[in-house]
Amino acid sequence: MIDTVDERATDISIRAAVCPVCGRILYPIPLVCSCGQVHDLDGPPWEEREIAGPCTLLTWTRLKALPDGFTENEMILGMVEFSNGVRAIGLLDSESPKLGMELEAEVQPCNAGEYRHGPRYVLKETSCVSS
């Protein structure tokens, strides 16, 4: 499954799936779970859940050679873990990232070149998140 964004839509999300056999939460959504259950239209339905919100920074890296279409000179990517065990990568919005820091994952459209049609996580420090 590919996450896509309708540019006219106001509600975008990134979703994970729950395997109906083993209950594992999977992101990105695969065609086959590690237990062997196939994710198809003929099998049992897979529940989908939005994944966003509080998370913990596991690791990060600074990218300085970005593909065409990006206006930034560099970006920081972070890998985070949500409370349900799902791990994801997103754009880290922090001046001084520290492993283990608490972040808030917000889903936003990506507006860079050929990548502008998919959602992405923007990972913000919890003290910087507006309510």
Image (cartoon, rainbow, N blue to C red):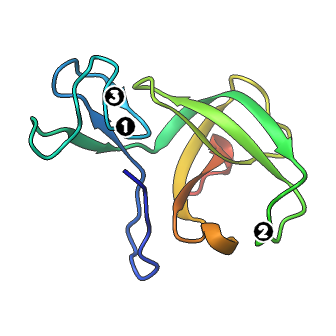
Q: Quadrant of residue 113?
A: bottom right
Give the number of the disc on residue 25.
3
The reply to whether residue 57 is in sight is yes
Q: Residue at horizontal 90%, vertical 62%?
A: 73
Q: What separation in Å lies between label 3 and label 2 (alpha carbons)?
A: 32 Å
Give the number of the disc on residue 43.
none
Comparing 56 with 77, the one in front is: 77
Q: Position of residue 32 (x, y in %)?
A: 31, 31
Q: What kind of residue is marked 2?
A: Phe
Residue topped by disc 1? 30
Residue topped by disc 2? 70
Does residue 97 appear left or right of residue 4 in this picture? right
Q: Quadrant of residue 69?
A: bottom right
Q: What kind of residue is marked 3?
A: Ile
Mark 1 and mark 2 residues within 8 Å of each other at the beta carbon: no
Q: What separation in Å lies between label 1 and label 2 (alpha carbons)?
A: 28 Å
In the rendered view, would you say 6 is above or below 66? below
Q: What separation in Å lies between label 1 and label 3 (alpha carbons)?
A: 11 Å
Q: Position of residue 78 (x, y in %)?
A: 70, 38
Local crowd at mark 1 within 10 Å, few (<14), some, or many (≥20)?
some
